[in-house]
Amino acid sequence: MIEFYLRPKVERVIFQPLINILKRCQITPNQVTLFSLISGLAVIPSLTLGFPLIALAMLWLSGVGDVCDGGLARESENTSDLGTIFDIVSDRCVEFAVIFALYLVDPTRALVTLMMLGSVLICVTTFLVVGIVVDKRGPKSFYYSPGLMERAEAFIMFSLMMLFPAWFTALGWLFVGLVSLTTLLHIKRLN
């Protein structure tokens, strides 16, 4: 929800200057996506080795890359189906990496992290299916069905889980609930 409603304003003010720099340096959108993926995967060693602030920085660097890759692709008129697929797959890899790292920190979290993964899997599936069947197009390469729990909210929740491990269980179940509610909202858009 934050991303859908605030991103256009924030992207123009905060991310557009960065996108302009990337464009001038002739960095491609796929290179930015790769940077985003690598930064997100770096959460695993950072968090499991006991460096939650570094893990947090890697997570948010990944998020910045995720905002910039699409903006750069549109700005440089360098959009492609392959780039869209790479971006979406990369995003899911980062989300998996974060949840996996949260599990590795304390394997007694297995049930909550498994439910987190399951809720994300189902939510992303409904998001993509709604994007396929709804005959609408926006600035992105597919219909974007906004939800209660989007990437920005997930990153905020992941950040809280990293910073406040004693609250992990409550935050994890809240995450599952919000992602599941988002799934229902995606399905409701079909009516």
Image (cartoon, rainbow, N blue to C red):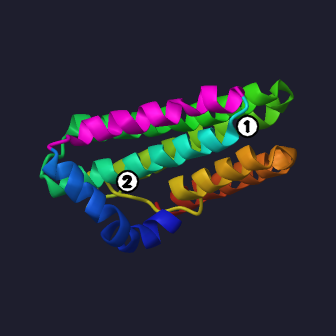
Q: Residue 13 magenta-drawn?
A: no
Question: Three-letter amino acid code at disc 1?
Answer: Met
Which range is magenta? 26-49
Disc 2 residue type (three-letter):
Val
Horizontally, is 28 left or right of 171 in the view? left
Residue 90 visible somewhere in the drawing: yes
Q: Look at mark 2 in the image and give the residue it sits on.
A: 67
Q: Where is residue 161? Give x, y as percent.
A: 74, 47
The residue at 50%/36% (across/down) is 40
Q: In the rendered image, which quarter is residue 36 located in?
A: top left
- Kindly check if marks 1 and 2 are in contact, taking CB atoms under 8 A apart as contact: no
In the image, which disc is placed on residue 115? 1
Main secondary structure of the magenta stretch? helix
How crowded pointer 1 is (Cα within 10 Å; few <14, some 14-19, many 20+) is rated as some
Q: Is residue 43 magenta?
A: yes
The kind of secondary structure element at disc 1 is helix
Q: Nearer the viewer, residue 39 or 80?
A: 39
Q: Residue at x 42, y 46 (%)?
A: 128
Taking the image as drawn, is residue 191 in sight?
Answer: no
- Secondary structure at badge 2 equals helix
Q: Position of residue 97 (x, y in %)?
A: 58, 31
- Give the image location of residue 143, x and y in percent: 34, 57
Which is closer to the viewer, label 1 or label 2? 2
Image coordinates for residue 49, horizontal then vertical, percent? 70, 26
Tell me how far mark 1 sits from mark 2, CA to CA: 27 Å
User: Does residue 163 appear left or right of residue 181 in this picture?
Assistant: right
